[in-house]
Structure formats: C-alpha cells, structure tokens
Amino acid sequence: MGLLSIFGIKSKGEQVKEMLKEGAIIIDVRTPQEYNEGHIAHSLNIPVQQIEARISTIKKKGKPVILCCKSGGRARSAKAVLQRNGIKCMNGGSWGGLNYMIH
C-alpha cells in the first residue's frame, strides 16, 4: 500500500492485478519480430497498426484488455483506439515491466 492509496489512487500494479482478476487478456502491440524476441506467456500479439482492424475480434472476447509494448508509447496509442470502441483497457507499459508485475 503506497502513499497514493490513502487518496484512493491505485498503483499500476494494483490496477493490473484487479484487471487480471476480471479475466483481462494481455495484448502486446509490438511487431511480430519484437514479440518473438520475448513476450509475456499467453499474451496475444496484435501490432498497433492492426488494432483498429481487429476491434471486432477483441470485442468478441468480452474481456478487459491490458496493453503492453517496448516502452508504453504504442500501448498508449492502442488504448485510445480500444477506449473509443468501448473496450475496457489499460496501458500496462513495457512488456518487461508488466511481466515483472504479474509474476
């Protein structure tokens, strides 16, 4: 429990754990080449350029989404697209940092 918790503000780690309890899926928005060099087990690889075209597939899963990439920048872009389409999601930041949080 950090200082921000006193004010009702949850840390990214707390948010990630809550989303995972809700059955969230992890989508890595890096290129397939980057993904193949290392990724979170059981994550999906949907490059950021394909997110818009794959909205219906993501919606069909009926689950919240945690996005990640190399540093969080592409995940931020993908988050904006998913939110515009009514999908509950969050930017998990870098895949390495997110992997650390969930293990």
Image (cartoon, rainbow, N blue to C red):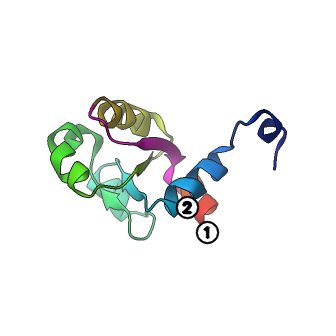
Q: Residues within 10 Å of mark 2 (few under 14, many from 20)?
A: some
How many badges with numbers are in the image?
Answer: 2
Q: Quadrant of residue 24?
A: bottom left
In this rendering, position of residue 72 left or right of residue 88: right
Q: Please give the range of residues in magenta.
A: 85-95
Say which amino acid is labelled 1: His
Q: Is residue 9 above or below residue 16?
A: above
The relative height of residue 76 versus residue 38 in the rendered view (above or below) is above
Instruction: Give the image location of residue 38, x and y in percent.
Output: 43, 64
Residue 24 versus residue 28: which sits nearer the camera? 24
Q: Quadrant of the C terminus?
A: bottom right
Q: Is residue 96 magenta?
A: no
Q: Which residue is mark 1?
A: 103
Q: Quadrant of residue 42?
A: bottom left
| Residue 97 placement (x, y as % from top left) | 59, 53
Where disc 1 sits, the SS reads loop
Direction from residue 55 to residue 69 in the image, left or right: right
Q: Position of residue 72 (x, y in %)?
A: 49, 39
Please provide percent x and percent y for residue 30. 35, 48
Report if the CB atoms under discs 2 and 1 are less than 8 Å apart: yes
Q: Nearer the viewer, residue 3 or 78?
A: 3
- How far apart marks 2 and 1 lie (CA) works out to 6 Å
Q: Which mark is residue 17?
A: none
Does 17 appear above or below 77? below
On the rendered structure, is 90 left or right of 77? right
Task: Indicate the secondary structure of the residue bearing disc 2.
Answer: helix
Query: Which residue appears at 49% of the width and 54% of the height?
Result: 95
Examine the image and state in which quarter residue 74 appears. top left
Identify the residue position indicated by label 2 in the image.
99
